[in-house]
Amino acid sequence: MSNNNISGLHPTRTLKRELASRVTRGCIVEIGVAYGDGIKEICGVTKAPVVGIDPFLPYVSFLGGGRYGPETKRRYLENIAGVVNLAGKRPILIEKRAEVAAATWQGPIGLLWVDIGADKDYTWQVIKPYEPFVIQYIAINGLEYSSSETPELVRRLERQGMRDITDQIYVAVLQRVRFRQAGPRWVR
């Protein structure tokens, strides 16, 4: 993967576009869509179905104090109005907590993009319900804010059949070793 900052994008946005363009099977899931900028970026580079998961619950960011909640949904909907992926399909919004959305999920996931929570245990709770699914890439954003917890989270995923292919400080990227085969369920 490239560390190049194309088009003046932040390295994490560049990486998100690069990973989304590599998806060969399944859909792309972004957990925590905020204002929809990431969804727009993803739709611009893929034919895969794009799904955003966000309950739009009131939340104050531990980074800079940004406020999110029900009003964020209005801005999200305005921001993605008219957006389609390269196959002409609109992104899907699931307005539930990620853990709840996973309970009804079916099919493979090409890219699971997760913004890391304030602690590794919460991030693991978000990722863990997706264990039964075959996932090509998992990207965990926000490592510079949670570096002490990140190695353990990455080790957990590696024990689940993922390989760490990270090459930058902001995002841990793990790739399923045998994605083309219907792999076994993750080890509990």
Image (cartoon, rainbow, N blue to C red):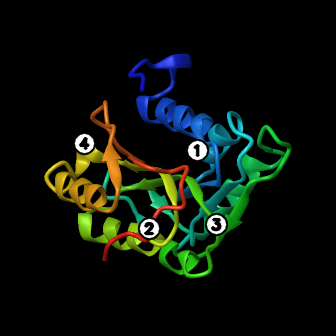
- Mark in front: 3 vs 1: 3
| Residues at marks 3 and 1, CA–CA distance in whole angstroms | 22 Å
CA gap, disc 1 and disc 4: 19 Å
Instruction: Say whether disc 2 or disc 4 marks the residue closer to the N-terminus.
Output: 4
Q: Nearer the viewer, mark 4 or mark 3?
A: 3
Judge from the rendering whether residue 43 lies leftward or rightward of residue 20; answer left or right. Answer: right
Residue 58 visible (yes or no): no
Are the two marked residues, 3 and 2, in contact with CB atoms closer than 8 angstroms?
Answer: no
Q: Secondary structure at mark 4?
A: helix
Q: Position of residue 130 (x, y in %)?
A: 47, 70
Q: Amino acid at mark 3?
A: Gly
**Sequence order check, earlier mark of 3 and 1:** 1
Q: Residues within 10 Å of mark 4 (few under 14, many from 20)?
A: few
Q: Which residue position is annotated with label 2?
A: 184
Q: Tell me if residue 51 can be seen.
A: yes
Using the image as rendered, state which of residue 64 and residue 27 is in the foreground.
27
Could you tell which of marks 2 and 1 lies nearer the N-terminus? 1
Residue at horizontal 50 percent and vertical 29 percent from the top: 14
Task: Give me the C-alpha separation between circle 4 and circle 3.
Answer: 32 Å
Callout 2: helix, strand or loop?
A: loop
Q: Which mark is residue 107?
A: 3
- Cα–Cα span, label 2 and label 1: 30 Å
Reading the image, the residue beneath label 4 is 144
* Residue 17 horizontal/vertical position (percent): 57, 34
